[in-house]
Amino acid sequence: MINQDEVLAVRRAVRRILLVDDEESVLFAMHQYFSLRGHEVHRAADRESAERLLDELPFDWVVTDLHLTPAREQDGLSVGRKASDTCAERVVLLTSHRTSDVDREAKLAGIDRVLAKPVTLPDLELLLETTCEGQP
């Protein structure tokens, strides 16, 4: 029987990924995970850095946290909007405070998916891969 990892290994393409989170440990873990799978990974810890990278490089996937400052501003929505505007293939917003208002704002910003934290990295990768294949 073929397992999930084997299916992904066959379908996986190298993606350029932008990860945005103000928590260094989260960025480190996601960076390690996606890098070890052969992807080109870039990191940003704040909205300004993320938007600068989006101006400089095209990204296939952008994964951003909703709150990128201690003041709990929703900078992730701005990052997601810019990523969507710059033709990122998939834009995912992560949040530990998911509400219908956040979902509505994310949709208006062009964000493809809002995920409630915690989310496992294999689940995130599977979501990105399968959504890119046109599956719901």
Image (cartoon, rainbow, N blue to C red):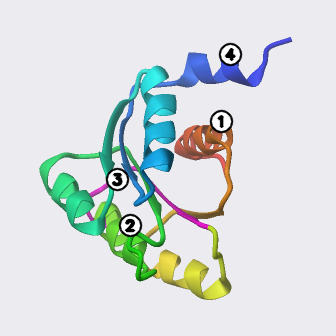
Q: Residue visible at 22% across and 55% down? A: 54
How far is the residue under mark 2 from the one under mark 1?
21 Å
Label 4, label 3: how many angstroms apart (C-alpha)?
Answer: 26 Å
Q: Position of residue 49 (x, y in %)?
A: 22, 59
What is the distance, in whole Å, between disc 3 and disc 2 at their CAs?
A: 9 Å
Disc 3 marks a residue whose amino acid type is Ala
What is the x, y in percent for residue 104? 56, 84
Q: Is residue 105 magenta?
A: no
Q: Which residue is mark 2?
A: 80
Marked residue nearer the N-terminal end (2 or 1)? 2
In-front residue for pair 71/35: 71
| Label 2 or label 4, whichever comes before in sequence order | 4
| Kind of residue indicated by mark 4 | Glu
Q: Earlier in the sequence, mark 1 or mark 4?
A: 4
**Does residue 45 appear to the left or right of 23 in the view shown?**
left
Residue linked to disc 4: 6
- Residue named by callout 1: 122
Residue position for label 3? 88
Q: Upstream in the sequence, badge 4 or badge 3?
A: 4
